[in-house]
Structure formats: C-alpha cells, structure tokens
Image (cartoon, helix red, strand yellow):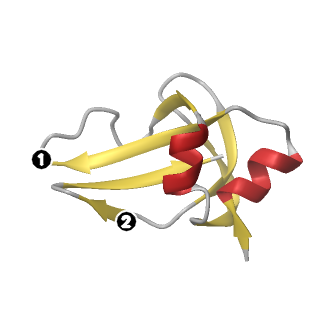
Amino acid sequence: MTTLRELVEAHTANAAIFADRGNGAAKGERGICVTLDDDMLSEYGDIEMYKLDTPHVSEDGYTCEWASDWFTSGQIEERIFF
C-alpha cells in the first residue's frame, strides 16, 4: 500500500491533482492541481494510492502515474491523482 503522504514525501511535492464529480463538483473528473498544506495532508494524506496502468493527464496538463479510488465527500465524489 502506498499513501498520498508517502508519494508527497518521496517526491518532495507540494501539490496533487484533485478531481470530483456529482452535485456541486467544481474540478471535473480529470482534475486540477491543488497545493497541499498541512491541513490537507492531515485530511487526505492516508488515502491509498494505486499505480495506474496508463498515465492520466489532468485538465491543466499534469501527467499522473498514481490515483486513489473515488471516495465520497459530502454530495460529491472525489479522486486524487499524483
């Protein structure tokens, strides 16, 4: 198992791609880059990430090799790419 926090630390990253779908979704299913702060890492850092078979390209052009499963957050579903 690999978590978002482990990927962030291994790559000294300060951002990840957040995607969403459903009522009130704002980022879209391809996702956009979001800067991670300590509060976000506290909330999302332990989410399991899986190596993708093929790269994913976000709405804003970032190529990602990792993704979480879709998870429910209020009225929307979210997914994280890295």
Please tell me in which quadrant of the rendered image residue 36 appears: top right
**Residue 62 horizontal/vertical position (percent):** 64, 29
Q: Residues within 10 Å of mark 1 (few under 14, many from 20)?
A: few
- Tell me the quarter of the picture where residue 5 sits: bottom right
Q: Dot 2, how many residues are within 10 Å of its Cα: few (below 14), some (14-19), or many (20+)?
A: few
- Residue found 33% across the figure and 37% down from its top: 28
Give whichever of 69, 61 is nearer the camera: 69
Residue displayed at 87% across by 49% down: 10
Residue 3 position in % (x across, y down): 69, 64
Relative side of 79 to 55, left or right: left
Q: In the image, is residue 49 above or below residue 64?
A: below
Residue at 52 percent across and 22 percent down: it is: 60
Q: Is 4 left, or right, of 68 in this rendering?
A: right
Return the mark for residue 74. Answer: none
Residue 33 % position (x, y): 54, 29
Left or right: where 2 falls relative to 47 = right
Number of labels in the image equals 2
Q: CA distance from mark 1 to mark 2?
A: 14 Å
**In the image, farthest residue toward the bottom:** 1
Residue extending farthest to the left is: 23
Is residue 70 shown above or below 5? below
Q: Secondary structure at mark 1?
A: loop
Q: Quadrant of residue 35?
A: top right
Q: Secondary structure at mark 2?
A: strand
Residue 23, disc:
1
Q: Which residue is mark 2?
A: 71
Identify whether 13 is placed above or below 69.
Answer: above
Is 56 in front, or is 3? 3
Along the polypeptide, which appears first: circle 1 or circle 2?
1
Q: Amino acid at mark 2?
A: Phe
